[in-house]
Image (spheres, helix red, strand yellow):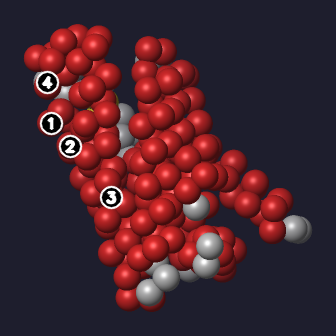
Amino acid sequence: MTEKTKKLVLASLMCALTCVATMVIRIPTPTMGYIHPGDALVILSGVILGPSSGFLAAGIGSALADLLGGYFVYVPVTFVIKGLIALFCGLIYQKAGKIPGFRYPAVAAGGVVDIFLVAGGYFLCESFLYGPAGALASVPANLIQGVSGLIISLLLYPVLMAVPEVKQMAQTHQSL
């Protein structure tokens, strides 16, 4: 199997896993949204696939979850926010992950990016939909979601890096 085919298969898998992780475990919030573990896969999409492929896998997988879950108004916003998270996570991992002792902290830094972009991105979007006061109500749940994504990604990272093909894919992007 060629490297290009492996990357396409892994990107498709990350897209599907992101969608499933977002849809299967949902903790409802008072603002009619939900908290889910999908952000961990968004972070890891950027780390493993690199910025551009991670953007697409995370953005499409997360947007697909909103589409299938009936959150139609959020589909384009989710695509952009989750895609940008993966993009930044990929960029951080490319730079900091070149140094062996900094790979794990690079994943953690990506998780911090997730926290800010999820809370800030959805606040901005919801400010247009519900006004600033209505948007502010969703910030605590979005912060919890971001923190859970950070923690779960840190737990999954060593497990995924134990898979030789996944580790090779992630290391390929560090040399760019």
Q: Secondary structure at mark 1?
A: helix
Q: Are marks 1 and 2 in contact (CB under 8 Å)?
A: yes
Asked whether disc 4 touches disc 3, contact meaning CB atoms under 8 Å apart, the reply is no
- The label on residue 137 is 4
**Which residue occupies the extreme right position in the image?**
1
Which residue is depicted at the point 49% across and 23% down?
75
Q: Percent position (x, y) of residue 137? A: 14, 24
Residue 151 percent across, percent down from the top left:
30, 61
Q: Please report whichever mark, 3 or 1, sits nearer to the chain's N-terminal start.
A: 3
Mark closest to the chain's N terminus, 4 or 2: 4
SS assignment at label 4? loop
Q: Check disc 3: other Cα within 10 Å, few if <14, some if 14-19, many if 20+.
A: many
Residue at which label 1 appears: 140
Q: Which residue is mark 3?
A: 111
Label 3 residue SS: helix
Name the kind of residue labelled 3 in the image.
Answer: Gly
Q: Nearer the viewer, residue 145 or 26?
A: 145
